[in-house]
Amino acid sequence: MRHNVIRQLRRYARTAVLCLSAAGVLVVLGGATPAISAPNEGGSPCADCHDKATASFNSSYHAKAWKGANGCQACHGSTDQHLNTEQAKNTIISFSKDGGRSAKELTAQCLSCHSSTNHVAFWETSRHKAAGMSCASCHTGHSNLPKNLKMPQTELCFSCHKDVRSQVNRQSHHPIKEGKVSCTDCHDPHGGFGNKMIKADSVNELCFKCHADKRGPFMWEHPPVEENCMICHTPHGSSHTKLLSKKSPNICQSCHDYSFHPSTPYGANGSFTNGTPVRQFVGRNCLNCHTNVHGSNGAGSQGLRFVR
């Protein structure tokens, strides 16, 4: 109620000033008093009530694009009726959570300008849209951050993807929290053909963009590497070295369990035979010998077994 009274008083004061100014002109020029309407361009009437919002908009990328002309109305719609009614939610386009607009309506408002850009081409089929999100879920026209984000990118993504935040904080992780890798280096938040909205047709193609040495070609290829890097690795972070999904040798023995020494459990059991420590007790890691685990160009059985 107090806010409405203050807004009404400001409106009366503004009208009074305009009337006095017009009267002064009439004294000099003579003539009939013209009809006076509240100004609705440039954002000045908005600042009377929304001073903080107007200040943040003036420092945003959108303000620079619109150059201050009709800036508020470009996204929020005409302010004429909004200035003369108490039902604000019904007369203005609000991007807040309780603004009364659906995600579809808010997205349509943004796409009225941004639909021609390639990065939103797959939005209609994206998982974020299917989850009920809109452009306003991550972006705001009042932001001066890159891409008009509401907050720095990693922090924004982690606000929903808390499981990924946990993985990134583990001892072996991609340098996301260090700022060397960002979420959008691998994912397209607006959708794409790849699974998990990745920026490639397959996981391997995405990984090979940075890890080109693992692509080969190799004379002897390790089948799981050729199939999918995520058979052995987790992409965001792991408690095991090299982002492995399991500790070696357990991860190796997930597949290699049918012949020769891989079929022997590499644990502390049976660690000594006739007073001599067995190799499983001393080494406990397949990678001690099989170092070229992604692929090898070695000759004969040496290459076949990916040994040094």
Image (tube, rainbow, N blue to C red):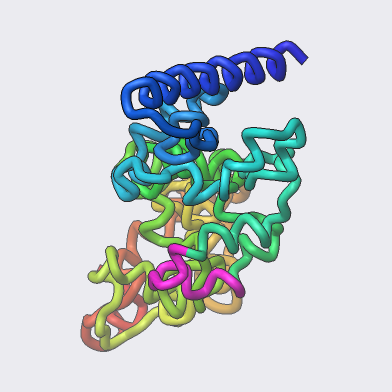
Q: How many marks?
A: 0
Which image quarter: residue 160? top right
Q: Position of residue 111 (x, y in %)?
A: 51, 64
Q: Closer to the camera, 102 or 284?
A: 102
Q: Is residue 140 above or below residue 266?
A: above
Q: Position of residue 291 (x, y in %)?
A: 31, 64
**Residue visible at 52% across and 45% down in the picture:** 157
Residue 225 part of the magenta-drawn span: no
Name the residue at the front extreme: 30
Residue 114 part of the magenta-drawn span: yes
Q: Closer to the camera, 239 or 122?
A: 122
**Residue visible at 32% across and 71% down in the picture:** 208
Q: Closer to the camera, 130 or 10?
A: 10
Q: Closer to the camera, 22 or 9?
A: 22
Q: Position of residue 87 (x, y in %)?
A: 76, 36
**In the displayed structure, does residue 221 sit left or right of residue 122?**
left
Q: Is most of the magenta stretch helix, strand or loop?
A: helix
**Residue visible at 60% across and 46% down in the picture:** 161
**Residue visible at 29% across and 77% down in the picture:** 215
Picture quarter with the N terminus:
top right
Q: Is residue 249 visible?
A: no
Q: Is residue 197 visible?
A: yes
Q: Is residue 265 above or below residue 302?
A: above
**In the displayed structure, does residue 97 sit left or right of residue 279?**
right
Picture quarter with the C terminus:
bottom left
Q: Position of residue 117 (x, y in %)?
A: 39, 70
- Residue range (magenta): 113-125
